[in-house]
Image: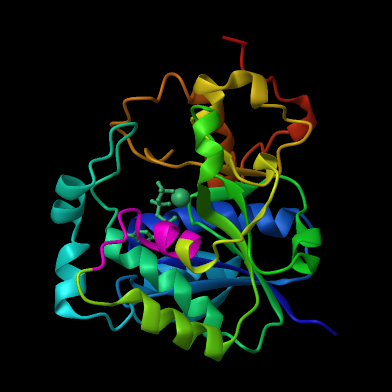
């Protein structure tokens, strides 16, 4: 029997809370795959309990053992200064360096096929068919314009664990003077230059809701991804614009009144 796993990563209390919504959403799709949460020491034991209660397997992991020079180049303040975010805001609890720990999933050779999901996603329809897709599949980073199709978004992707791949990644990742401006995303795009494209419906970025409303169709959306501002942030400049998506996330977070996805209204066309 092929071993399949959905895997996410959490390194602090904020993303641990977010993963509750993700794990609940996955469980509700009826998947038989393992649901795995890679958690660093930055997550308190008490914050892991709701995740295991929902059936998740907790895998303790370390951040990558990158060099001090690499860590300085990718430190939050330096990265924000050298590669500013002009289209949206990153919350204060987002530490760019932590993103690279996603690469640890390639060490999980007990699984044959993996679907990685950012902790700020929810899965609103079953996506088990992705386990049969090859490495490396990801959706394009579409949330504003056609030019977005050139880049991938690393919030949802397919992978085949292999210690050999992990080691090959480590020799490419931390080389003198390298700067991965969008961290794991830029690295993965470089490591897998011939990445396979998933439909955007497998990684619908929340900004599509107001920037490209014609692309949003609940009938085909499988994964909603809350890039930039997070749905649990109180002081969220786009709260009003994104209220329907925030309400949906909150329903999965609490487990109360999760709506029938086929009954949801699409955004008004611009
Ligand atoms: N992450 C984390 N702690 C951090 C930063 C990132 O656990 O400090 C993990 C988490 O799974 C998160 C993912 O890495 O969803 C990528 O970060 P985020 O989703 O905030 O980036 P965005 O989607 O906004 O580009
Ligand atoms: Mn994300």
Q: Position of residue 185 (x, y in %)?
A: 44, 57
**Point 49% across, 56% down: residue:** 119
| Quarter containing the N terminus | bottom right
Where does the image place residue 49, in percent across and percent down from the top left? 48, 70
Which residue occupies 51% across, 64% down?
50
Q: Is residue 157 left or right of residue 228?
A: right
Please state if 17 lies on the left or on the right of 179 as rendered.
Answer: right
Q: Is residue 258 magenta?
A: no
Residue in the foreground of this view, choosing between 202 and 253? 202
Say which of 9 and 103 sits in front. Answer: 103
Q: How is the image coloured?
A: rainbow
Where residue 87 appears, as percent x and y from the top left, is 34, 31
Instruction: Report the span colored magenta.
Output: 178-189
Residue under the point 50% across and 58% down = 19
Q: Would residue 33 be seen by someone viewing this image from the given angle? A: yes
Q: How many numbered discs?
A: 0
Q: Is residue 209 above or below residue 10?
A: above
Locate residue 128, reporting x and y percent.
78, 61
> Closer to the camera, 84 or 202?
84
Report the side of 83 relative to 239 (left or right): left
Q: Quadrant of ligand 1?
A: bottom left
> Which residue appears at 54% of the width and 90% of the height?
164
Check the picture and name the quadrant holding the C terminus: top right
Query: Is 108 rendered above or below residue 45?
Result: below
Instruction: Residue 61: tell me if it is visible.
Output: no
**Quarter location, residue 5:** bottom right
């Amino acid at each position: 029997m092929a071993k399949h796993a959905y895997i996410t990563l959490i390194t602090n209390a904020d993303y641990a809370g977010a993963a509750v919504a993700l794990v609940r959403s996955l469980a509700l799709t009826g998947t038989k795959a393992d649901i795995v949460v890679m958690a660093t020491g930055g997550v308190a034991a008490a914050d892991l309990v709701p995740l295991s209660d929902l059936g998740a397997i907790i895998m303790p992991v370390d951040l990558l053992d990158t060099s001090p020079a690499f860590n300085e180049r990718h430190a939050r303040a330096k990265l924000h200064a050298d590669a500013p975010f002009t289209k949206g805001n990153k919350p204060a609890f987002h530490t760019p360096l932590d993103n690279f720990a996603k690469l640890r999933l390639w060490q999980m050779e007990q699984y044959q096929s993996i679907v990685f999901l950012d902790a700020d996603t929810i899965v609103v329809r079953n996506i088990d068919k992705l386990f049969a897709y090859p490495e490396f599949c990801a959706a394009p980073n579409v949330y504003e314009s056609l030019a977005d199709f050139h880049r991938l978004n690393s919030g949802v992707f397919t992978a085949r664990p292999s210690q050999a791949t992990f080691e090959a990644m480590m020799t490419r990742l931390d080389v003198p003077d390298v700067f991965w401006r969008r961290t794991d995303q830029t690295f993965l795009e470089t490591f897998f230059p011939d990445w396979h494209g998933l439909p955007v419906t497998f990684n619908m970025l929340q900004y599509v809701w107001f920037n490209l409303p014609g692309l949003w169709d609940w009938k085909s959306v499988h994964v909603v991804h809350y890039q930039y501002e997070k749905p649990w942030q109180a002081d969220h400049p786009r709260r009003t614009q994104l209220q329907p998506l925030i309400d949906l996330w909150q329903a999965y977070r609490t487990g109360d009144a999760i709506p029938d996805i086929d009954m949801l209204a699409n955004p008004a066309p611009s």
